[in-house]
Image: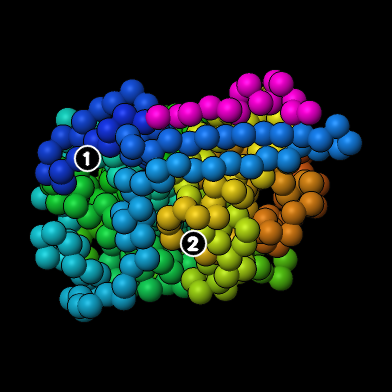
Amino acid sequence: MADPVVASHLSLVLKAPPTISSPSHSLPQQHSKPMASSLNSAASLRLFASSSSSSSSAAARLSLRSTSLSFSSSLKSLAFSPLSRHKRGSAVSMSSTGVFSSVASPKCAASDPDQLKSAREDIKELLKSKFCHPILVRLGWHDAGTYNKNIEEWPRRGGANGSLRFEVELKHAANAGLVNALNLIQHIKDKYSGVTYADLFQLASATAIEEAGGPKIPMKYGRVDVSGPNECPEEGRLPAAGPPSPADHLREVFYRMGLNDKEIVALSGAHTLGRSRPERSGWGKPETKYTCNVNVGVLDLVAMVVPVTASKDLSRIFVLELQKDGPGAPGGQSWTVQWLKFDNSYFKDIKAKRDEDLLVLPTDAVLFEDPSFKVYAEKYAEDQETFFKDYAEAHAKLSNLGAKFNPPED
């Protein structure tokens, strides 16, 4: 006999309003249910749960009716083709204006506040249609993460200065695939010339965290762009996934940035988003049951319903069913089941060690092995509120590393 509580909550029809499109050169329209916008108005989702009296575990099934999903074609566009042409040493790929800018933004003073606000809204619309939260987070991180506190001179010290838009830096092994992120946001840069690349990268990263359900990041803006590829940092400043001594490596890299053990662990928690692709990083499986055919647009709809009424195992069953026939850019191995939802699952899943389809890199595992790291990892696995607080502070600090602000900081 079906559990009446589970059945009453999961026998639902979730209907979405008409999808709102946003032209690339107009201000985005707003609507009150951003998660539901991923479903076409003709689509409905029925969730059913049943359980047997002979078993304590619930079995779940679902059927998708009229599964016309408005974002199928746009999600598939994330499988980018190789670059067809570029300007040697500066431009990386074609954009709506021709190429990524090979010079600094026309306005290198503090980015225009009104344009920043509008750019943020356009980024939010981009996230709703492309579900590119992980790669935008990575873009901001990798632009800032080259900072060396032991070098005073700007821009030789590295950091958040927009240098990642140049081919010479994009070719660094740690930045494999990030040209896709630039392709995604270049039309926003074209539209808002009063926003520097350095600010845009950090704005996109913070917005992606917040829109995935994470904490609000206390950001500041006014970063100045470097002007050419000759000002890019040398390769080797970003962390590796599988060094011989993971704890020593993490400390070497992050201490060089001026970060501490708590900040290392907190920032590692952002791996709750995204996947690792072996063709880019050399790590992870080509695909798993969580990434084999990804219907990302409805994961959060399930998350809103299932955890209220059922176990985590039942939640996972629903996620797997939703992913079977959905559109998207399949492949890779994720650290968490719902890899577009920012929460503390990363720490919980590493600690549990129960799912071989979830990725655990040597630099992930060491968070529960090193005595100092473990104090924070254990805390974050148990207390999401504390994790969110510490993460927001660490992300904000990272986003400012090495940046030259105009007007100058006090």
Nearer the observer, 142 or 290:
290
Q: Image point 41% across, 66% down: which residue?
A: 177
Answer with left or right where residue 299 lies relative to residue 348.
Answer: left
Answer with left or right where residue 69 lies relative to residue 14.
Answer: left
**Is 122 included in the stretch rendered in magenta?**
no
- The numbered mark, 1 or 2, whose residue comes first in the sequence reads 1
In the rendered structure, which amino acid carries the disc numbered 1?
Ser
Q: Image point 61% across, 67% down: which residue?
A: 284
What label sits on residue 330 in the rendered view? Answer: 2
- Which residue carries the number 1 mark? 21
Q: Where is residue 97 in the image (x, y as percent from the top left)?
A: 10, 60
Q: What stretch is highlighted in magenta?
A: 1-15
Location of residue 159 with respect to 235 vertically, above or below:
above
Any part of residue 159 in sight: no
Verify CB contact (< 8 Å) between mark 1 and mark 2.
Answer: no
Q: Is mark 1 on a helix, strand or loop?
A: loop
Nearer the observer, 132 or 117:
132
Q: What element carries label 2?
A: loop
